[in-house]
């Protein structure tokens, strides 16, 4: 049995929590506001396809977590927050985490979350990760909806090199996740995997929030598919700034993947509809900053980013 802290019980965190609880693991969740109140009073409900699962859960806000637990009572901390909340989370939980040794696994969008964790905790405590082919969001307090195979890819940050205690933990996590119905793989180059996901995220997230269209509508539209492909190509080019040299084969594979995936509303579109902060800076902003560093243009990303930013003002 694993003892797991999941920081951020939204669509992604809530779904994984349900799988792990069903498999008999001990899971503590953090949340806030009305969602936290319902989790505490009525438990967690997950809608996954035609299935509906409900579990009583232990849910806390960050102050309650710090007051009630030592970080090292957990085998691993999973961070499933929006990347827009990473800075605030580190301000609230950073000192608490700093005085422990528990490894932290980020399952967030973008490529800058792991460096932020490593700057505080040291790279030896950080596991990079991503949730692949999953759509998930809170539909009402206490209730999350998820779809897709919901695979986890994870690895030592920034690269797997030699003997490292994180390797044994990753293998244990992979085995336990698989047994819980969560497809999981361990990568020896997690930065490569994170950038490949960013290719998809930058390709569809900002444009979907701007147009209101789902991923299939975008990738099968005669004009919008060209913009999706262009933004993905700019992300591939931007990866070179981090010495992650994605190439044409990565672009083709990622474009094919998102074109043939379920028609989903992206997380950024859902956030816009609900009036929540957008992960624009950690997706399009990352690409623009890397392209500027390389001295190359990113006209598709720059235009969509500007239009979407303006629509938010």
Image (tube, rainbow, N blue to C red):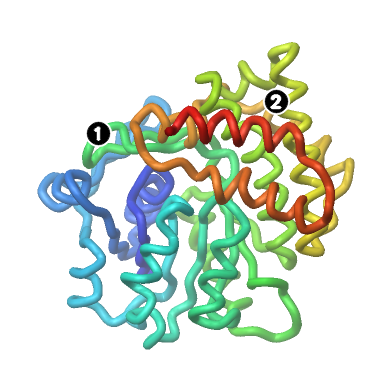
Dot 2, crowdedness within 10 Å: few (<14), some or many (≥20)? some
Towards the viewer: 64 or 223: 223
Q: Mark 2 points at which residue?
A: 259
Q: Position of residue 232 (x, y in %)?
A: 74, 37
Q: Under tag 2, what secondary structure?
A: helix
Report crowding for label 1: few under 14, some 14 to 19, many 20 or more residues within 10 A (C-alpha).
Answer: few
Quadrant housing the C terminus: top left
Report how far apart the C-alphas of labels 2 and 1 lie in the structure: 29 Å
Q: In this view, does 86 lie to the left or right of 204?
A: left
For this orientation, the residue located farthest to the right is: 248
Taking the spot 60% from the left edge, 34% from the top edge, the residue there is 306
| x, y percent for residue 4 | 37, 67
Compare residues 313 and 73 and report the one nearer the observer. Answer: 313
Q: In this view, does 19 lie above or below 114?
A: above
Residue 99: x %, y % from top left: 37, 88
Residue 254 screen position, x and y as percent: 75, 38
Residue designated by label 1: 140
Residue at the farthest left position: 41
In this rendering, position of residue 269 left or right of residue 53 = right
């Amino acid at each position: 049995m694993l003892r797991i802290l999941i920081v951020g019980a939204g669509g992604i965190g809530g779904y994984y929590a349900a799988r792990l609880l069903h498999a008999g693991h001990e899971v503590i969740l953090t949340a806030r506001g009305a969602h936290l109140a319902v989790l505490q009073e009525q438990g967690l409900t997950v809608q996954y396809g035609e299935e509906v699962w409900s579990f009583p859960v232990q849910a806390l806000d960050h102050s309650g977590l710090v007051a009630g637990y030592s970080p090292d009572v957990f085998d691993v901390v999973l961070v499933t927050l929006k990347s827009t909340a990473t800075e605030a989370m580190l301000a609230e939980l950073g000192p608490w985490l700093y005085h422990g040794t528990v490894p932290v696994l980020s399952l967030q969008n973008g490529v800058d979350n792991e460096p932020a964790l490593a700057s505080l905790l040291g790279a030896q405590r950080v596991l990079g990760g991503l949730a692949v082919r999953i759509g998930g969001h809170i539909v009402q307090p206490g209730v999350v909806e998820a779809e897709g195979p919901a695979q986890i890819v994870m690895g030592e940050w920034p690269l797997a090199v030699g003997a490292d205690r994180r390797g044994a933990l990753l293998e244990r996590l992979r085995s336990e996740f698989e047994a819980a119905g969560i497809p999981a793989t361990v990568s020896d180059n997690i930065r490569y995997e994170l950038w490949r996901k960013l290719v998809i995220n930058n390709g569809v997230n900002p444009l979907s929030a701007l147009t209101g269209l789902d991923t299939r509508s975008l990738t099968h539209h005669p004009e919008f598919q060209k913009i999706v492909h262009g933004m993905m190509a700019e992300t591939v080019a931007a990866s070179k700034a981090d010495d992650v040299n994605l190439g044409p084969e990565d672009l083709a594979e990622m474009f094919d993947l998102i074109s043939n995936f379920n028609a989903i509303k992206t997380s950024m579109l859902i956030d816009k509809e609900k009036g929540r902060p957008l992960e624009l800076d950690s997706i399009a902003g990352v690409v623009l900053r890397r392209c500027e560093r390389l001295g190359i243009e990113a006209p598709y990303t720059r235009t969509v980013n500007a239009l979407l930013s303006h629509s938010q003002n």
